[in-house]
């Protein structure tokens, strides 16, 4: 429980830290790179990230098979599972290098339509470095998964926070030396190697991790393949949903439009981390509940309890962004990125539904009932592509974001909630009743926010802070008094007590 609390608190601490650093670092990075160079980096990074699909969903299956091996065979079984996963991921790493090499050799055919000869050569170097980074990440993921299965969240979050701090410290000198977008990838590789080395050392020295390569179970591999196939399908879908827009814009509009979309998408990613950083902490607990054969009531209670906390935090950010998101982006990225505001808002609003329900993904996997979600998301991806192409041609980046938003509302807002109720055993009526009970507490700060932005022009960082600080205080007071139950109030008081101790 202490590891979970520390993991959750440090996850939010890392999110706050990375956001604060980005407020200072990102504008400098955007100006040093320039819109064209940043757009090129966004385009190539989104394209090469498709190689991560070569994990075939096996990484997400590790905790499930670790838990089963530990229960049935003890440490010997865990060692064999570790050896199997390491062997599989070493093979995948070799395949990713082969496929990546083909892509690097043909970069001029892939992006020739909209990139200049100089941009194509830069794209070639970026591709080669990104391919190397992804290949190394595959075998290293076994160690991070082992740490998660052991519920050592404190170590993971501290390492992530150190990486968050080091990234701009190392990056800025390279940007000032004129290395451009290549420096972004070089720093990513160096920090990945350092953090992976720390994880490997922690696994062997502190956790006593063992790997056994002598008993490769092909029957178990077939079972894992069947379980992981739909996770893999869902990874493809997610990759399509989150990279199709930048790829499409790079083809039809060039690097400038891609850069604007990239800024809006980056704001959206920060929004997502407020929720996704907490879900991994509860994955081992969910698998234990399902493995013990308990009824669905504890899962509904956990699902709802976490969802309420996520909703309160997310709505603070979303409503605040509605009021001062536009001046924030102009101050943060520059006036040429003002088009990123509607893109970010269009992505953020519908994403709120799956973000407050992301524990449902782990519950589905623990019950081995994640196949339906993959099928639904496959349909969403096809719909996203079909809608985003005409909307992107007509409205540019905003049209692409709108196509993604429509697919999320249909798939996550309607179909998946029906599936949770009918087939997973979660009481979604209770869940949404608990969530909607929070909404009345949001009205007073929202009304005051409307009045404030009508009476005053909040421009620049100073204006954004002048609005955000009192707004957050009023929001927190209203939620505490009008929406939180006693358990949530005690959690809030506990956090405040810890903050006073830390000071």
Image: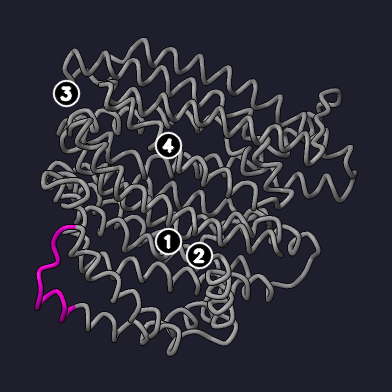
| Left or right relative to 3: residue 354 | left
Q: Which residue is mark 3?
A: 114
Inter-mark Cα distance, 4 to 3: 30 Å
Mark 1, Cα crowd under 10 Å, few <14 / some 14-19 / many 20+, is: many
Question: Tag 2 or tag 4, which sits nearer the N-term?
Answer: 4
Residue range (magenta): 450-460
Place of residue 362 in the rendered image (x, y in percent of width and height, measured from the top left): 61, 56
Horizontal and vertical percent position of residue 227:
66, 43
Q: Position of residue 407 (x, y in %)?
A: 33, 55
**Would you say the residues marked 4 and 3 are in contact, meaning their CB atoms lie under 8 Å apart?**
no
N-terminal-most mark, 3 or 1: 3
Marks 1/2 in contact by CB < 8 Å: the verdict is: yes
Q: Position of residue 480 (x, y in %)?
A: 45, 84
Please tell me whether mark 2 sits on a helix, a strand or a loop: loop
Residue at image mark 2: 357
Task: State the CA–CA distance, disc 2 to disc 3.
Answer: 39 Å
Q: Is residue 254 magenta?
A: no
Q: Residue furthest bottom?
A: 482
Q: Which residue is mark 1?
A: 412
Q: Nearer the viewer, mark 1 or mark 2?
A: 2
Upstream in sequence: badge 1 or badge 4: 4
Query: Which label sits in the foreground, 4 or 3?
Result: 4
């Amino acid at each position: 429980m202490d590891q979970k609390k520390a993991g959750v608190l440090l996850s939010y601490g890392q999110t706050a830290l990375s956001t604060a650093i980005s407020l200072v670092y990102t504008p400098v990075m955007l100006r040093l790179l320039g819109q064209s160079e940043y757009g090129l980096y966004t385009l190539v990074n989104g394209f090469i990230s498709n190689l991560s699909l070569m994990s075939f969903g096996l990484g997400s299956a590790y905790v499930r098979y670790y838990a089963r091996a530990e229960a049935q065979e003890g440490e010997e079984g865990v060692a064999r599972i570790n050896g199997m996963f390491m062997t599989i991921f070493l093979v995948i790493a070799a395949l990713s290098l082969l496929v990546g090499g083909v892509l690097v050799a043909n970069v001029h055919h892939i992006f020739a339509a909209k990139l200049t000869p100089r941009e194509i050569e830069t794209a070639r170097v970026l591709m080669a470095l990104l391919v190397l980074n992804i290949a190394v990440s595959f075998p290293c993921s076994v160690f991070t998964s082992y740490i998660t299965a052991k519920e050592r969240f404190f170590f993971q979050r501290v390492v992530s926070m150190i990486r968050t701090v080091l990234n701009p410290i190392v990056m800025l000198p390279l940007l000032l030396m004129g290395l451009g977008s290549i420096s972004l990838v070089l720093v990513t590789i160096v920090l990945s190697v350092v953090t992976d080395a720390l994880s490997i050392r922690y696994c062997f020295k502190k956790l006593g991790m063992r790997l056994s390569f002598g008993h490769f179970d092909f029957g178990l591999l077939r079972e894992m393949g069947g379980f992981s196939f739909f996770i893999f399908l869902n990874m493809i879908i997610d990759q399509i949903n989150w990279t199709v827009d930048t790829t499409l814009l790079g083809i039809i509009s060039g690097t400038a439009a891609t850069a604007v979309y990239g800024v809006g998408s980056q704001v959206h990613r920060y929004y997502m981390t407020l929720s996704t950083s907490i879900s991994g902490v509860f994955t081992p607990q969910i698998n234990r509940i399902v493995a013990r054969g308990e009824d669905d009531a504890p899962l509904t209670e956990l699902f709802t309890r976490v969802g309420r906390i996520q909703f309160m935090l997310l709505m603070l950010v979303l409503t605040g962004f509605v009021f001062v998101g536009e001046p924030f982006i102009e101050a943060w990225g520059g006036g040429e990125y003002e088009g990123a505001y509607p893109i970010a808002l269009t992505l953020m609003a519908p994403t709120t539904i799956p973000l407050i329900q992301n524990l449902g993904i782990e519950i589905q996997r623990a019950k081995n009932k994640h196949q339906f979600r993959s099928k639904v998301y496959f349909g969403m991806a096809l719909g996203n592509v079909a809608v985003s192409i005409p909307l992107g041609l007509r409205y540019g980046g905003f049209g692409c974001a709108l196509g993604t938003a429509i697919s999320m509302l249909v798939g996550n807002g309607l179909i998946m909630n029906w599936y949770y109720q009918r087939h997973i055993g979660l009481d979604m009526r209770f869940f949404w009743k608990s969530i909607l009970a929070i909404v009345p507490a949001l009205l007073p700060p929202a009304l005051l926010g409307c009045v404030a932005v009508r009476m005053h022009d909040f421009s620049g960082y100073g204006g954004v802070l002048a609005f955000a600080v009192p707004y957050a205080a009023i929001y927190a007071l209203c939620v505490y008094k009008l929406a939180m139950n006693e358990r949530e109030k005690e959690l809030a008081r506990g956090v405040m007590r810890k903050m006073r101790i830390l000071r």
